[in-house]
Amino acid sequence: MSTPVSAAHHAGPATGKELTTLSLAALGVVYGDIGTSPLYALKECLAYPAIPHAAVPVPSAVLGVLSLVLWSLFLVVIVKYLTFVMRADNKGEGGILALAALVPSARGKLGPLTVAALLGAGLLYGDGVITPAISVLGAIEGLGVATDALTPAVLPLSLAILVGLFAVQRHGTHRIGRVFGWIMLVWFIVLGVEGVIWVVREPGVIRAVNPWYGVQFLLTHNWHGFLLLGSVFLVVTGGEALYADMGHFGRKPIRVAWYAVVLPGLLLNYFGQGALFLSRPVETVKNPFFELVSGPWIYPQVILATLAAIIASQALISGAFSLTRQAMQLGFLPRVSVMHTSAKHEGQIYIPEINALLMVGCLALVVGFGSSSALAAAYGIAVTGTMAVTTLLFYQVARSRWGWPLRKVLPLVTMFLVFDLAFFGANAAKIAHGGWFPLAVGGGVLLLMLTWWRGRQELAQSMNAGSIPDDLFFADLTETRTHRVRGTAVFMTSSSEGIPNVLMHHLKHNQVLHKQVVLLSLITEPVPFVPGNNAIEVHELAHGFYRVIARVGFMQSSDVPRILARCAPQGILAEEMTTTYYLGRQTLLTTGRIKMARWRKRLFSFLMKNARPPTDFFNLPPNRVVELGVQLEM
């Protein structure tokens, strides 16, 4: 994911002041989502009858739910992610696409695990729409706890905050990112202090540490207890972010922040809310988080909760930007406008198209569902699906790349899947009540990704079929004595062999060539960053022709002028005012014989027409670009 804080790729382990700084920064990004779960998680589990599907908060149910919360945090966050999954880094980067890139696959083919990873990525977009909506709504609803007179203001105020949040994205987050960590530090301290006060009042709540209370709750509540796992899961919904943001902070800072600040704050607050339920008459607690405080203290509580919700939302929005760029670089999404909001850190980007789609989705959810409780019914199933896919990918990486024996990896992965599938099954009951939304978003994004990938594969084959071998072209060039003009011509080609179609069209119509011709192929490798000494290959061909093969990682931008400048020691002198870039503009006809459904051909054609021009994507000077039309049948 992209974050509002500098990326932290270290040559060695962080120590001392650097570790403290990175751990503090991780608080403001990695733990925003999971850190705001106390706003609504326990309320969904125990605030009966305000929440109809909640358990009646008798002491046995309170202790049982708290036990499930505690052990879910321990087994999912600590054991699965912090201990094992974070070992599976792709050159220091984490996240589901980075993990999928580690899985061996045949070139030009999509394996079932890669498709599953793409579905997981699509589900993360659904999560990115729901998280801002439920976090902001959950925070602002504290006003209704303070006084019924402010309840009508909750919805419009939430909408206004969300509009403002998305409106400031184009300015970048590097300025306010510095204070995110400090705000979240205060947030977790407040969570812990409020919880301690109630735990001291009702110390019997500590008995929930015993896992038997959780087991007993599931046994006594039968089907209702199993379904309530869908609400318990809300306490670990931010677990995937720990892995996704690993490349920005490193393992150690994320672990230090968790054990030193996040885990104590969360557990104390959850146990404090449990103590509140135990100390009050049954069925009288409506919003346990805000009822931990009373009187005028509830207003600063609302303000702090709103700030925490905005920070949690920011992390998901920035993550959607980063995920989009990764998918685009790997060839699964069409080109979109990627705007860099920081001159120092490449990871800080803004994508207007994604920002607009997320904003419309968030506003529609807030208006359509109206409360955090209603939204909680739609929340969770997308994350459980992504977590299950992560487990499957982890198994494949452990077996194929690390060489772990089956006896070592199978019990571990089985335990992970038991929890993943149990939570997924419990959340499946939410599908009819809103859970369909993130599934629809994930399915729609998967369809777009698969259609774009397949279309590009077919298009590349059609283009390559029209190319001719190097030796045949140069033999013909020697005989015809084509007129040469000064300067450099750069022809972008997807293939690293043969003479591209766009050059043949140029020669056919203009009957002239530049004195220096560069055939440039850009290849995206399944790693986040390609080191400089391995990134560029230059091959001198003949007649002033050069073939340049440039390799980039899926977290890097494809800056063609900068790539050419690095080729100067190999004899390529591409001066800015004498270099012309030639691109092919394909017009697709969907009447061809390619084995692809007609509606998918039309969808691919639509995506191609609306993709951003390559000029911006490759950072080409607009006044030095020539596009040549090519008509192709699909």
Image: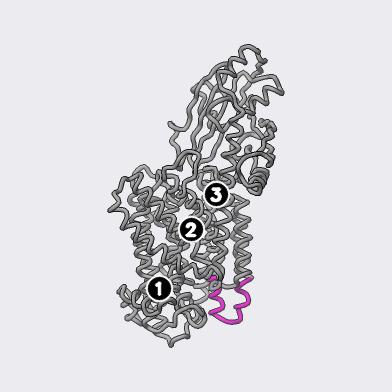
Mark 1 neighbour class, 10 Å CA radius: few under 14, some 14 to 19, many 20 or more: many
Q: Amino acid at mark 2?
A: Val
Q: Main secondary structure of the magenta part?
A: helix
Q: Position of residue 435 (x, y in %)?
A: 54, 66
Q: Which mark is residue 270?
A: 1
Residues at marks 2 and 3, CA–CA distance in whole angstroms: 26 Å
Q: Is residue 32 visible?
A: no
Q: Are marks 1 and 2 in contact (CB under 8 Å)?
A: no
Which one is in front in this view, the residue at disc 2 or the one at disc 3? 3
Q: Is residue 101 left or right of residue 615?
A: left
Residue drawn 60% across and 78% down? Answer: 150
Residues at marks 1 and 2, CA–CA distance in whole angstroms: 26 Å
Q: Which mark is residue 324?
A: 3
Disc 3 is placed on an element classified as helix
Q: Amino acid at mark 3?
A: Thr
Rendered image quadrant of residue 378: bottom right
Q: Position of residue 278 (x, y in %)?
A: 39, 83
Disc 2 is placed on an element classified as helix
Mark 3 neighbour class, 10 Å CA radius: few under 14, some 14 to 19, many 20 or more: many
Q: Is residue 299 left or right of residue 249?
A: right
Residues at marks 1 and 3, CA–CA distance in whole angstroms: 35 Å
Q: Which residues are magenta?
A: 134-155
Q: Is residue 471 visible?
A: yes
**Which residue matches tag 2?**
179
Q: Which mark is residue 306?
A: none
Residue drawn 53% across and 27% down? Answer: 497
